[in-house]
Amino acid sequence: MMNLKVMRVVVPGFRYSSVPAPGPDGDPGGRLAVDADPQIPRRSPGVTTRPGLSYRDQLRLDLVAPTGPGPFPLVVYVPGGGFVIAPRGAARREREFVAAAGFVVASVEYRTTRQQATGRDGLADVGSAIDHLVDHADTYGIAADRVAVWGESAGGYLAALTGLMDPRVRAVVDQFGATDLTRIADGFDARMRATVEDPQHPINRYGATAPNPIELVRPAAPPFLFLHGDDDRIIPPSQTLALHGALRAAGADSTHYLLAGAGHGPLSRSRRQARQWTSVQVLSIIREFLDRQLRTG
């Protein structure tokens, strides 16, 4: 039986590089100095939560919605977890902050290496979650024609793929996500590279059959927003910058912010770094992007 509720586990193969990856030549993305204060609230007012909704087999999602009748645009949040776990309870504060601005935010769990799954399985699970939410749009107060996906880390990888493969998706938010799994440790120290290059590493087991999002880029791709820390010691910024560059080269709409001094979200090496990702400044960028893409046209 699957158990996808465990959130506090040691992820096999998890490691920080002792050095950051070198910065890009030139700067294809915008650099952003983040003021970690003020922080988003611990609890956002004006939202209701419906946890543990079943959407496929034993997979569940948590729904946060504004109070009121709706319908509201849908944002599907895909959590990270190194392709080993997919904790739907992750980023609760961030999801509530976005929902309070007038969005239904669904955090979905998906199969990982713990269930001997591959990236294609995880991608299918995210698609099934969207199917369920759209099919029950009236029940959940969702505007079914206004859908975005939002992912962090491993979830950013699946969110990017979903956005490039599912025509229902109108916008993608990718925070420090993977792109090319064969180059996931480029620029890191030798020990980090050796760890990730092990065939048994979860990245290699999960990504064996999954595509590289860059291979799916097209001019009609939905708008993307990327945010990545320049001191991320787990996934180098070159990963999101490569996809951003490919989208721009194809003529698609893409915005990239490189956060000065920021690490890998909640897995940053210091509390100061982590607080950048829960700042009003960063979450407002995400909310404003979603507002532009899902409330117009």
Image (cartoon, rainbow, N blue to C red):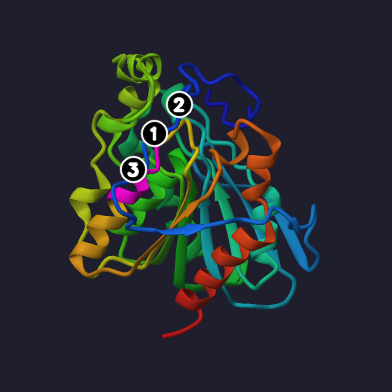
Q: Which residue is mark 2?
A: 19
Residue depicted at x 78% and y 57%? 41
x then y, percent, for residue 148: 46, 64
Magenta stretch: give its range: 236-242
CA gap between label 1 and label 3 equals 8 Å
**Marks 1 and 3 in Cβ contact (< 8 Å):** yes
Q: Which residue is mark 3?
A: 238
Which residue occupies the foreground of this view, 135 or 42? 42
Principal secondary structure, stretch drawn in magenta: helix
Q: Which residue is mark 1?
A: 21
Where is 219 relative to 131, above or below? Answer: below
Crowdedness near tag 2: few (<14), some (14–19) or many (≥20) residues, C-alpha within 10 Å: few
**Sequence-earlier tag: 3 or 2:** 2
* Residue 267 position by quadrant: top right
Residue 81 visible in the displayed image? yes
x then y, percent, for residue 172: 42, 60
Q: Is residue 179 magenta?
A: no
As drawn, which residue projects farthest toward the bottom? Answer: 297
What amino acid type is highlighted by mark number 1?
Ala
Q: How many marks?
A: 3
